[in-house]
Amino acid sequence: MHRQSQLFLPTERQPPADAEALSHKLMVRAGLIRQIGSGIWSWLPAGWRVHQKAAQIVREEMDRIGAQEVMMPVLVPAELWKRTGRYSSEELFKLKDRKGAELVLSMTNEETVTTHAAQVVRSYRDLPFSLYHIQVKERDEPRPRAGVLRTREFIMKDSYSFDRDQAGMEASYEAHARAYDRIFDRCGLEWYAVESDVGMMGGVGAHEYMAPSPAGENDIALAPGYAANVEVATAEPQPVPPLPDHITGELHTPGASTIEALAEALDVHPGALLKAFPIVTEQRGLILVMVRGDHRVNDVKLRNALREPFRPAHDDELADHGLVGGYMGPKDGVELILDAAVAPGRYVVGANKPDYHVVIDVPEGERLDVRTVVEGDTVNGHPIRIEPAIEVGNIFKLGTRYSVPLNATYLDENGAEQHIWMGCYGIGPARIAAAAIEQYADEHGISWPRALAPWDVHVVALGREAELEAAEALAAEVDAEGLSVLLDDRPLRPGEKFADAELLGCPLRLTVGKRALESGRAEAQIRRGRVDHEGGVPLRGGGPAVAELWASLP
């Protein structure tokens, strides 16, 4: 049992002025976290209890699939990151020690764990195995926001699987995926797994676990049987009216340098126009990417399609190739990439001279899917919807992405050297906590799922000696049932106590006041929905009744 009079729980009536996400506002107001710098937060006692409950669920499910817990350092020699090609990341904290040795503060631990595997694994008999740890990570986040959702320092569970071949990796990946399903179910979250981009992690495939929330930093495309991050989502485009026959040849379009202005001037659907996106890559030079006028280029899909980074073309590069901003179209000598949604037919494009466009016939030919899907596009005939979500976990099929540069090999049955196949799997306990707040809070405060609540039962004493004595006795009985109890023994007015209780959001509140002493029954309120439990619970001998009621809660 914890006494609230002795607890470091600095609740606030007003949220921080810069807070936008609901979880940010409520975690500060409820005294769970406090900020020490941009993107740098301390977890206070009540908040840390929530964090540790999430972490323990993760730990139990990792142990269940046979993963072994380790602890790896945050501070790592830079050489390892240079060998994998990730040292150039702008989000990586880099430093030197007093002797000038280059070091990094790890965002993830692929380099470290693969180095250990390379040192230890010799034979196929040493495989498979999985390692995990729950550790502080550092990231030079350019735009910290939303409280603990986007920070510069955070705690993550990272696990890594090591297998002989792709089939083994796939089996480990599936085992982790099922473990993640159980984790998020146990945490009480609404969630779904979606296809995602491998990003800087590399590898051959990835999924993200998403908790729908208005505060989410990711947009997810959803349809029956389909879920994908918008960064990689693919769908059938919505049909658009064809270009009218009377619009043909070269068109004088003064001032129509945007799709919106051109569509209005010609009185056509924007999808009958083509939008130009000029880029430059190191290997291929200047490229003109064209999408339908009602679509936009998806940077992630374009980078993946090109298989190399790109940047927007500069004005002088456009001029050197005869491309005119605002009136840009295909040009001899400039590589052209058409998006897959550009069906064969007639379109209006820039004529590469000011104030002019031209109608062209786009033939059949190779296309690349480089656009961002939009609501109303379809998958298997079903319209997609797009909603924001919080990324609470991710899993990656790394393949040999790290074992090759770090020389993690084994000898197979024939004595031949092979590279280890790997997977990596991350979960953020802080994000789980924030997602639970976002999904279940109301206008009065947090409403925790049972599995994450800082305390199972909040006993509130109203009054002085007799009421407090009865509340202490009830709290002790509930504690004896194996439930964690917070006793509000502070000499405050009932309204202040109730406001703090609703803000903190424990699943069940028991109130012991004058009426409870007279009736012999404590009032019981279920936090989710603020529902009063009819008849309350016995003031004496009520421990089992409270435990039974608590077990029925979400």
Image (tube, helix red, strand yellow):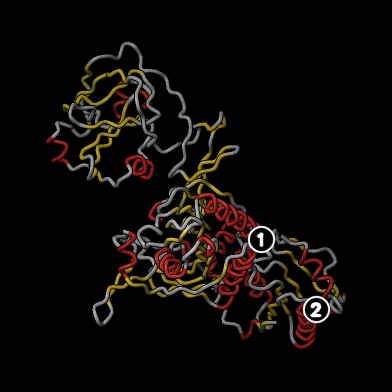
Q: Nearer the viewer, mark 2 or mark 1?
A: 1
The residue where tag 2 is placed is 514
User: Dot 2 lies on which element?
Assistant: helix
Ranked by sequence position, the earlier of labels 2 and 1 is 1
Q: Amino acid at mark 2?
A: Lys
User: How far apart in space, not on screen, are marks 2 and 1 (Cα)?
Assistant: 38 Å
Q: Do we see residue 257 in this rendering? A: yes
**Quadrant (top left, top right, bottom left, bottom right) of the N terminus:** bottom right
x and y percentages locating residue 372 in the rendered image: 41, 38
Q: Residue at x 20, y 31 (%)?
A: 334
Q: Nearer the viewer, residue 318 or 489?
A: 318
Q: Is residue 375 above or below residue 426?
A: above
Relative to residue 246, is residue 496 drawn left or right? right
The residue where tag 1 is placed is 186
Q: Residue at x 18, y 43 (%)?
A: 314
Q: Nearer the viewer, residue 202 or 487?
A: 202
